[in-house]
Image (spheres, rainbow, N blue to C red):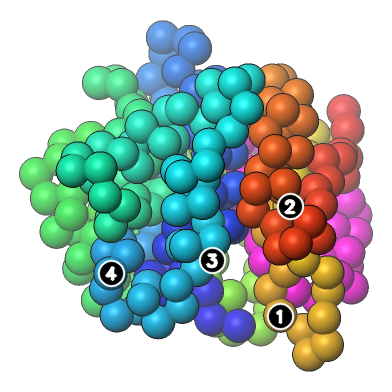
Amino acid sequence: MNYRHAFHAGNFADVVKHLILVRILDYLKRKPAAFRVLDTHAGVGLYDLEGDQAERTGEWLEGIARLVQTGLPPAAAELAKPYLDVVKAQNPDGQLRFYPGSPLITRSLLRDQDRLFALELHPADAAALHENFAGDFQTRVTHLDGWAALGTHLPPKEKRGLVLIDPPFEEKGEFTRMVAGLGKGHRRWPGGIFAFWYPIKEPSEVESFVADLKATGIPKILRIELTIRAPSTPARLFGTGMIVVNPPYALEEEMKTLLPPLSALLAEEGRGGFKIDWVAGE
């Protein structure tokens, strides 16, 4: 599976992933102290939905386009508003063409005292990311393997913040790398918030990943998943998941508000579902 961001920008997985990101950032902003976000697989930051890569898949039509056109019930809409405001700001003429990736969403929501470190390994994407943030003193863009940053960039001097890990799943072993990466990062910064995105394609592979997470002994691990269709043979992407370590106290309840209407909106022919559970509690 190749989940390079440009091919899938604005799809159902991005919608769920970025809503979770926004809710975590909202929580961090409730205290005046500065925080830092480390985005380990940042992509380019902004995607043209009419560009060759996004047009080739058209996945955004069943993701962000559906959300913008249909909307959510009032309580869920209030939670989604900061996210949709960022999307709308990139499309001031009201036509949905550009989709902000996680670094641009994050940067749009930072206060003056907060910082973003955005890392990207792919040379062309790293160059585009650097150009998109040129002159921005609150954002540092680095051409670097994001997995290495879990050893070199933690803990941040602010002592508060989020590590967002959203790998492309271009190679085998990403689930193993996530477990190892979490172990490394958590040892260096046990009080930090860590959010790991993963595709749901092979259910047995996901359950093995969750079991390995549980075996680490790391506490406070929340699992959030949304599926849009049933598993199939041959296997194809049918769901999206996020593992959040040290989640904000409000995140579980907010997801219980957001995921039911999102599942109904994004699923194919009513075949979707969602899961919110604790891999490990206190």
Residue under the image location 19 percent in, 40 percent down: 92
Q: Is residue 32 above or below residue 203?
A: above
Which mark is drawn over residue 167?
A: 3
The residue indicated by pointer 2 is: 226
* Circle 3: residue type: Pro
How far apart marks 4 and 1 lie (CA) works out to 24 Å
Q: Quadrant of the C terminus?
A: top right
Q: Is residue 63 left or right of residue 204?
A: left
* Circle 2: residue type: Leu
Residue 175 visible here = no
Q: Is residue 195 left or right of residue 243?
A: left
How far apart marks 2 and 4 lie (CA) works out to 26 Å
How far apart marks 1 and 2 lie (CA) works out to 15 Å
Q: Nearer the viewer, mark 3 or mark 2?
A: 2
Q: Is residue 142 above or below residue 248?
A: below
The residue indicated by pointer 4 is: 50
Closer to the chain start, of discs 3 and 1, is 3
- Residue 144 in the magenta stretch? The answer is no
From the top left corner, tell me how far across and down residue 192 is, in percent: 59, 33
Q: Could you say which quadrant of the image residue 191 lies in?
A: top right
Q: How many other residues sit within 10 Å of disc 3, few (<14), some (14-19) or many (≥20)?
A: many
The residue indicated by pointer 1 is: 236
